[in-house]
Image (tube, rainbow, N blue to C red):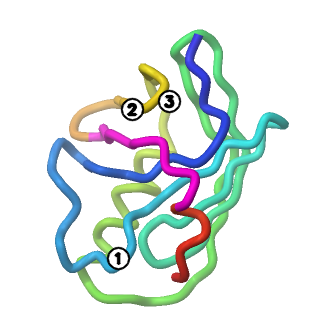
Amino acid sequence: MVDLGGTWRFETLGGADLPPQVRQAPWLTFDGDGQVYGLAGVNRVRGTWQLAGEDLTFGPVVSTLMAGPDEAMACERQVLDLLSQPLRARSDGERLDLAGGGEARATLVRDDRAADEPT
């Protein structure tokens, strides 16, 4: 069983490291009550999640609507695209691998301090 509880910081998106121009790595915090919130790149996000075995789905995810640097906005689009589709989630407790269709994949690491960093 995959334990998603806590905060996870994105290390890779689409199989590549995050661009160095991204000021703060995107992150997600999964609450035990099925709520998720975080930072997609520039904007804050909030929504719901459900896990059945390794199958992870997100309910509607909403975000704030601020603009940012091109690289950060491109990163954000990848995060939001990832969260919009069914995913396979695998974790060893410290790393979380998410895979959807095509290039939609990401590696996240457990980082409870990510949510405390200023945006």
Is residue 72 a member of the stretch shown in magenta?
Answer: no
**Local crowd size for mark 2, using a 10 Å CA cut-off: few (<14), some (14–19), many (≥20):** some
Front-most of 12 and 87? 12
- Which residue, given by chain and number where applicable, does mark 2 sit on? 95
The amino acid type found where label 1 is placed reads Met
N-terminal of the pair, mark 3 or mark 1, is 1
Range drawn in magenta: 104-113
Tell me the quarter of the picture where residue 92 sits. top left
Image position, residue 48 (x, y; %) = 73, 44
Of tags 3 and 1, the one toward the viewer is 1
Front-most of 27 and 92? 92
- Which residue, given by chain and number where applicable, does mark 1 sit on? 73
Image position, residue 41 (x, y; %) = 42, 70
Compared across the picture, whether 45 is left or right of 96 comes to: right
Tell me the quarter of the picture where residue 70 sits. bottom left
Image position, residue 43 (x, y; %) = 53, 76
SS at mark 1 in the image? helix
- Report the residue at 29% width, 70% height from top: 74
Residue located farthest toward the right when viewing the structure as drawn: 33
Total tally of numbered discs in the picture: 3
The amino acid type found where label 2 is placed reads Arg
**Local crowd size for mark 1, using a 10 Å CA cut-off: few (<14), some (14–19), many (≥20):** some
Looking at the rendered structure, which numbered label has been put on residue 86? Answer: 3
